[in-house]
Image (spheres, rainbow, N blue to C red):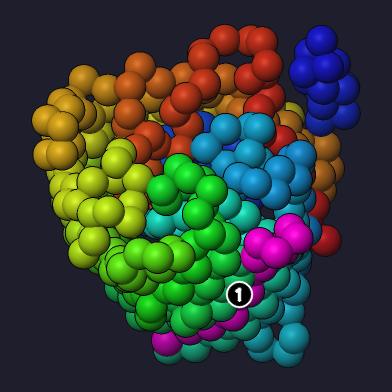
């Protein structure tokens, strides 16, 4: 009932596309922390140089502050409240964003996990324009519950020159203590330390098409009382192409196809959960089709289907082909205020489709039943242009 009430209240006040919310990106089949080919202010979590295109905005994302979620949200239940703003300082643009727990190359806490995931994140970005557009940002997150704690430090960079862009995130430091449940499944205390982790991406725009590539490497060691230290590492390679076409003045069509290969290796089988095993590999060829239309002057409607054409988890020979995720969302505008919501989302199987997915599990939108129950408006974002 509360979800229906939320929708009624939203409709009573209010989209042209907000270009500034998790709801919009996930409705279009992308990851919550940015897209390689769709313009959106959340691309700052991929490339901090992009904030020069989204000046003077305040962005808010509703959530429930679930501090035990590993990262910021496969489902609405793990969707942390967060927000920030962009502004100008002379010829420069800066941004301050709070509580977005990024899973991009923070290493230990992004790919291996901790019983107490980092929260209270803060990120500051600074960018400039010229013959070369550039941007840098620094981010930190941490959490403590009794004797358990976790933290990370990371930095991002990005440069853009004409049609080419190069960007990345570097995980400088990540640690966790008493990270038990997601590693061994026991009560044994575990200390985890991440090494330098790297997430690189590059894009090249050609008319309506964007070509891109990505490389992600994470590495960490963890120890448990009375056991041999384990070293784990994950490497991900991906290439893809995204296409955007203005079909009419009010409707845009999107399409993306990519090929991903990922491998995780652990040096000590005895010190990790059986489900992780010693070596895990996967490959996948997903395709995403999406559309966004300005149905009314105040209402935008968007949706997507993500489908794995080919793919396999080589650990248990799970076929990733024929797995699909369907999502739908709306955006509503009232003056300078934009409200975005994800109406519904659902998946038939593990998708491995999103740009930010560096593991072997579900895509960002999977795991929810498609329908109008508790998933109704499962993401709500507000953007104010000032």
Look at the image and tell me whether residue 17 can be seen: no
Asked whether residue 146 is drawn in magenta, I would say yes
Query: For numbered disc 1, what is the local secondary structure?
Result: strand
Residue 351 coordinates in the image, percent (x, y):
32, 31
Residue tagged 1: 139
Quarter of the picture holding the N terminus: top right
Look at the image and tell me whether residue 273 can be seen: yes
Q: Which residues are magenta?
A: 132-149
State the residue in front, 267 or 250. 267
- Image vertical order of residue 285 relative to residue 262, above or below: above
Residue at left offset 15%, top offset 26%: 319
- Image vertical order of residue 15 relative to residue 219, above or below: above
Residue at left offset 52%, top offset 21%: 368
Report the side of 79 relative to 253 (left or right). right
Residue 206 coordinates in the image, percent (x, y):
25, 59
Report the side of 342 relative to 236 (left or right). right
Residue at left offset 35%, top offset 45%: 273
- Image vertical order of residue 322 relative to residue 371, above or below: below
Residue at left offset 57%, top offset 32%: 75
């Amino acid at each position: 009932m509360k979800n229906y009430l939320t929708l009624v209240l939203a409709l009573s006040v209010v989209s042209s596309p907000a270009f500034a919310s998790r709801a919009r990106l996930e409705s279009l089949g992308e990851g919550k922390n940015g897209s390689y080919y769709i313009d959106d202010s959340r691309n700052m979590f991929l490339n901090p140089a992009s904030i020069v295109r989204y000046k003077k905005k305040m962005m808010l994302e509703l959530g429930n502050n679930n501090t035990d979620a590993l990262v910021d949200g496969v489902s609405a239940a793990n969707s942390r409240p967060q927000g920030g703003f962009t502004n100008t300082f002379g010829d420069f643009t800066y941004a301050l964003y709070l509580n977005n727990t990024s899973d991009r190359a923070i290493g230990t806490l992004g790919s291996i996990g901790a019983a107490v995931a980092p929260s209270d994140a803060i990120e500051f970005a600074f960018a400039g324009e010229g013959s070369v557009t550039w941007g840098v940002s620094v981010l930190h997150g941490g959490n403590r519950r009794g004797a358990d704690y976790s933290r990370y430090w990371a930095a991002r960079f990005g440069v853009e020159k004409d049609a080419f862009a190069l960007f990345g995130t570097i995980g400088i430091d990540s640690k966790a203590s008493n990270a038990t449940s997601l590693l061994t499944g026991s009560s044994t205390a575990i200390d985890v330390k991440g090494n330098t982790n790297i997430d690189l991406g590059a894009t090249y725009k050609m008319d309506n098409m964007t070509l891109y590539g990505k490389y992600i490497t994470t590495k960490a060691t963890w120890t448990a009382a009375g056991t041999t230290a384990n070293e784990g590492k994950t490497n991900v390679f991906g290439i893809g192409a995204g296409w955007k076409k203005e079909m009419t003045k009010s409707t845009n069509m999107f399409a993306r196809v990519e090929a991903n290969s990922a491998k995780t290796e652990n040096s000590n089988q005895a010190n990790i959960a059986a489900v992780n095993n010693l070596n895990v590999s996967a490959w996948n060829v997903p395709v995403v089709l999406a559309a966004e239309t300005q149905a009314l002057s105040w209402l935008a409607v968007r949706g997507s289907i993500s489908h794995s054409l080919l793919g396999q988890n080589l650990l248990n020979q799970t076929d990733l082909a024929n797995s699909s995720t369907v999502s739908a969302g709306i955006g509503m505008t009232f003056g300078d205020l934009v409200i975005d919501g994800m109406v519904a989302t659902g998946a038939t199987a593990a998708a491995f489709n999103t740009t930010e997915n560096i593991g072997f599990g579900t895509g960002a939108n999977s795991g929810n039943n498609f329908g109008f129950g508790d998933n109704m408006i499962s993401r709500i974002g507000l953007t104010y242009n000032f």
